DNA sequence: CTCGGTGCAAAGCTTTTGCATCCGC
DNA sequence: GCGGATGCAAAAGCTTTGCACCGAG
């Protein structure tokens, strides 16, 4: 069931990517599709290095440069989203077929949670109107502390 | 008038900083106060390098390491806020006595505008309640395109 | 007098770039 | 075959670290 859904999602994603590459006159190289596949088989956030390493472990012959290049394109066509969660390490995430969401980061244990709130859309609309902007997307990150038992390492430092 | 206000703000800021340093048993070094002063005499966003350079130009003897160190402390005690606007270059901004605001970035000309919307507070409250989090602060960035004449360099790349 | 803080330079890490080679079109 | 894309390694850019010295408490 989950596998079926994922396959369906992935087929759609491949089509979208193919169409985008054609529209932009970019080449449909095998590397680009392998990277797309690897990303959509992952759960949650990841950084460039871990993506690169896991492809190396599967004996794909890719370079970091190509991973960066492909990620840029995938972000451009909205199949992947890029986040800057504080530290200087970009985090990525597949974004097609998954509910849009924002992030909540625990400043103690650095865990990242997700949440959805439709009211952000209202804010975007208001700002678009008042400031004469065409808002395409947003990044909302809430920083705080877990108040439940999940967060063990509270007073670490 | 503006000068008076700034002096008043700066006096308060110095007191807060002093109290924080004492509370945390950190030393009240001249470097830390000079850096605080330089930050509060600036308008808008800045990065570490430009802060460092302008202090060098004033013939202060500071090192980048000290600038980074002091900024960390100032962020901790909420006198300065740190932003990661996409690129891997942290941007800072004084934050005491100025209205809290969020940012709007033009993806074409990379201009950064500011806006306020009280509804973000509601979202923070809801998330705090539902997810059992104590939200301390947030970062909301809207990405889009100017639709007015201000943005000249639209189809640059 | 102690030991936290500083300046300086080197090291670390992520990302970008240069170049020869490869291969999609 | 042309020119974009790749792999590799070197370079670049921001930030952190190591160490000897300085100076706040």
Image: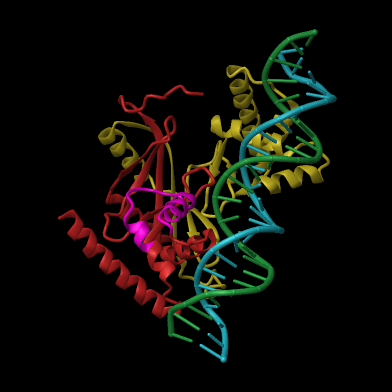
Chain colours: A yellow, B red, C cyan, D green
Q: Position of residue B78 (x, y in %)?
A: 37, 64
Locate residue D17 relative to residue B10 in the image: left or right. Answer: right
Q: Is residue B129 visible?
A: no
**Could you tell me which quadrant the C terminus of chain A lies in?**
bottom right
Q: Main secondary structure of the magenta part?
A: helix
Q: Residue at x 70, y 45 (%)?
A: A51
The single residue placed furthest to the left in the displayed view is B1
In the figure, residue B4 lies in which quadrant?
bottom left
Q: Is residue B84 magenta?
A: no
Residue D22 or residue B99, whichever sits in front: D22
**Could you tell me which quadrant the N terminus of chain A lies in?**
top right
Q: Position of residue B106 (x, y in %)?
A: 40, 34
Locate residue A60 relative to residue B28 in the image: left or right. Answer: right
Q: Residue at x 49, y 58 (%)?
A: A105
In the figure, residue A156 lies in which quadrant?
bottom right
Q: Residue at x 56, y 36 (%)?
A: A96
Locate residue A26 relative to residue B58 in the image: left or right. Answer: right
Q: Is residue B80 above or below residue B107?
A: below
Instruction: Magenta stretch: give its range.
Output: B36-59
Residue B103 or residue B38, whichever sits in front: B38
Residue B87 or residue A124, whichever sits in front: B87
Q: How many marks?
A: 0
Q: Is residue B41 visible?
A: yes
Q: Is residue A44 above or below residue A146?
A: above
Q: Residue at x 28, y 47 (%)?
A: B116
In the figure, residue A131 lies in which quadrant?
top left
Q: Position of residue B129 (x, y in %)?
A: 38, 63
Q: Is residue B38 magenta?
A: yes
Q: Is residue A111 above or below residue B103?
A: below
Q: Position of residue A107 (x, y in %)?
A: 49, 64
Q: Is residue A13 above or below residue D9?
A: above
């Amino acid at each position: 069931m989950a596998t079926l859904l994922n396959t369906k999602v992935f087929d759609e994603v491949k089509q979208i990517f193919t169409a985008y590459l054609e529209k932009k006159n970019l080449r449909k190289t095998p590397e680009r599709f392998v990277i797309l596949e690897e990303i959509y088989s992952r759960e949650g956030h990841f950084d460039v290095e871990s993506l690169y390493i896991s492809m190396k472990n599967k004996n794909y012959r890719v370079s970091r440069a190509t991973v960066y290049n492909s990620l840029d394109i995938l972000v451009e066509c909205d199949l992947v989203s890029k986040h800057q969660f504080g530290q200087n390490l970009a985090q990525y995430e597949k974004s097609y077929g998954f509910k849009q969401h924002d992030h909540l980061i625990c400043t103690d244990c650095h865990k990242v949670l997700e949440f959805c709130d439709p009211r952000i859309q209202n804010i975007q609309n208001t700002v678009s109107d008042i400031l004469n902007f065409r808002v395409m997307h947003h990044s909302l990150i809430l920083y705080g502390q877990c108040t439940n038992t999940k967060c063990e390492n509270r007073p670490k430092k």
